[in-house]
Image (cartoon, grey):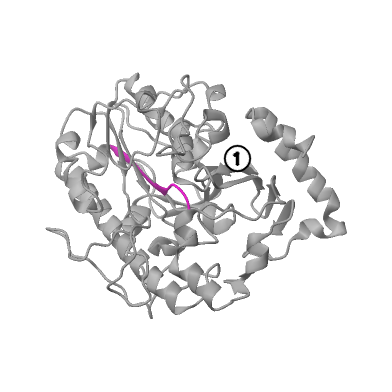
Amino acid sequence: MATPTDTRPNIVLIVADDHGREACGCYGNPVVATPNLDRLAGYGTRFANSFCTTASCAASRSVILTGLYNHANGTYGHTHGVHHFCCFDDVQTLPRLLAARGYRTGRVGKRHWAPVSLFPWDWEQPEGACGRDDVRMAESCRGFVYGRAPFFLYWASHNPHRAGVRDDLPLRPNSFGNPPASFPGDAEQPFDPADVLVPPFLPDTPETRAELAQYYQSIARLDRGVGRLLDILRDAGQFEQTVIVYLSDNGAAFPGAKTTLYEPGMCLPCLVRTPWDAGGVVCDGLITWADITPTLLDFAGAPDAAERFHGRSFRRLVGTAHPADWRTEVFAAHTFHEITNYYPMRVVRTPRYKFIWNIAWKLDYSFASDLWSASCWQGARRDGLERFGARTVEAYLHRPRFELYDLEEDPHELRNLAVEPAWAAQVASFCARLQQFQRDTRDPWLHKWEYE
């Protein structure tokens, strides 16, 4: 890989809020409008096996910005309001590490971390200053982008997270932040519910389609903001000196995705563009959001001690379709969403198999408040549906201690091999690997193997 020798690259990290990869053009959805993300994929590398480590907003962002699993950095769940989880005082964060290496740092958009003192920025916009207007949010960065290089910009959209209910539309779908009228200088792009693609984890009902249409509209606005940001980088003469990473904190805010560690919750978009690697590449290497901080430090020419992080740099995978001598498994660890949503899970994911340990499996699965109130879920309850998408409602609410899926034969994770005696040896092997992962990351839930 050829790298610039005269200067270190700028780094732009774009983090969407609840953008599932099933709703992205470059990942195969021909209906949702993501032309700018699709172009970004054409400029760079699209990762086919990229995963968050916990499918909850604040917890996931803590992993992205520290390189540590959230059970180790202290952010067990949400940071805001009564939830009040936060990073431990000695955690080193990405903005601090890059600033120490001479990078000018800036952030705009969603924050959702704590304590604020651990995340210092040379420039930042107040959280919520631009609301859901991502074109305006991109414009707010113009002065920062025109400043001294190298810089690190953390651009975190509030789209397409759920927001209020649309009383002005039939079936009262969630608005996903869509405004009643277009923002100045931007034009909203509505979608017809008849045209959306209902993914297999959702039921094909009028309520689901109405919500997906709103969700697509929010994603289209996010995409236009990304496009404006790319234009500003070009206007400033910085595009050819900038590494750009696009990802989502977790899967779509629908039951069956967000807060779960099934594929729709954790297998997410990740696009990486550098000034020096080939574009239009699809990489099948396994990466997680624990890798983001060490990777960006590596791009900055300032890799840190590997033992500081639970992830590792995947810089050498960019521009490579089938990387050799790379990892064969990744891990995920979810514990809380809101403080009332305790449902700890630990996961091993290989290219073919997924193994889930539901630590508190005797509990009913715990709903996030906005997912419970979603019209797609409430409509299914009203109609007495036995299935919510491909999975039965019973299987979704009441989970066994262990789940093992062959993702090649069973991509929707419906046949649990862990209950079949023929797979007992594989279950034991996955349990041992999870326990070693927990020891390596000092997971407080390790002792649950011994009692409870």
- Relative horizontal placement of residue 281, taking residue 402 as reference (left or right): left
What stretch of residues is rendered in magenta?
Answer: 242-252
Q: Residues within 10 Å of mark 1 (few under 14, many from 20)?
A: few
List the residue tagged with mark 1. Answer: 326
Q: For this rendering, which residue is in front, 356 or 243?
A: 356
- Relative horizontal placement of residue 408, taking residue 426 as reference (left or right): left
Horizontal and vertical percent for residue 147? 16, 31
Magenta stretch containing residue 151, yes or no?
no
Horizontal and vertical percent for residue 196? 40, 74
Horizontal and vertical percent for residue 108? 26, 39
Residue occupying image coordinates x 67% and y 55%:
352
Horizontal and vertical percent for residue 231? 19, 49
User: Looking at the figure, which quarter contains the C terminus?
Assistant: top right
Q: Main secondary structure of the magenta part?
A: strand
Residue type at tag 1: Trp
Residue occupying image coordinates x 34% and y 51%:
43
